[in-house]
Image: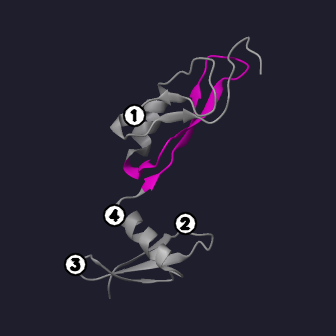
Amino acid sequence: MAPRETVICIGCPLGCRVTVLRDRKGNVAGFKGAECKQGQKYVLEELKNPVRTLTATVRTGDESCPLLPVRTSRPVPKALMKPIMRETARVKAAPPVKAGDVILKNVLKTKADLVATADWPGAGGEG
């Protein structure tokens, strides 16, 4: 029997549980449970190159707003999530910040920027 694994597809709102069938050499031999071709495409990409958009917070040094929410500007390799989080933990934002402002450019050479997802006027600022 061929080895199997299950991937939950997020290609559309159905959220299919797709079972990936592999041959004895480990190559993808087929799918079970994908309701559309978009799901098959998503699962193949997820197996080959899993990526995620990272959401986190960075320190501000402002007691009234100690953390600023941020995210990556594009999906990054799943294998780099922990190293990016370690890098994010070293960052301290400086006011003023508007949603969409780049907080850290090209994080770990991924071509993804860490961007603010909220405005922050900073200590003593208005807002």
Mark with earlier residue (3, 2): 2
Whole-number angstrom distance, CA of label 4 to CA of label 3: 16 Å
Mark with earlier residue (4, 3): 3
In percent of the image, x 52 and y 70: which residue is there?
9
Which residue, given by chain and number where applicable, does mark 3 sit on?
25
Vertical order, 75 against 115 (above or below): below
In percent of width and height, residue 117 lies at 62, 36
Please give the range of residues in magenta: 51-79
Quarter of the image where one finds residue 61? top right
Q: Quadrant of the N terminus?
A: bottom left
Question: Residue reaching furthest left?
Answer: 25
The mark found on residue 38 in the picture is none
Q: Amino acid at mark 1?
A: Asn
In percent of the image, x 26 and y 76: which residue is there?
26
Quarter of the image where one finds residue 45? bottom left
Mark with earlier residue (3, 1): 3
Looking at the image, do the residues carrying marks 3 and 2 touch, with CB atoms under 8 Å apart? Answer: no
In percent of width and height, residue 67 lies at 64, 27
The mark found on residue 106 in the picture is 1
Whole-number angstrom distance, CA of label 3 to CA of label 2: 27 Å
Looking at the image, do the residues carrying marks 4 and 3 touch, with CB atoms under 8 Å apart? Answer: no
Q: Amino acid at mark 4?
A: Lys
Whole-number angstrom distance, CA of label 2 to CA of label 4: 16 Å
Mark 1, secondary structure of its residue:
loop
Which residue, given by chain and number where applicable, does mark 4 sit on?
48
In percent of the image, x 63 and y 29: which residue is there?
68
The mark found on residue 10 in the picture is 2
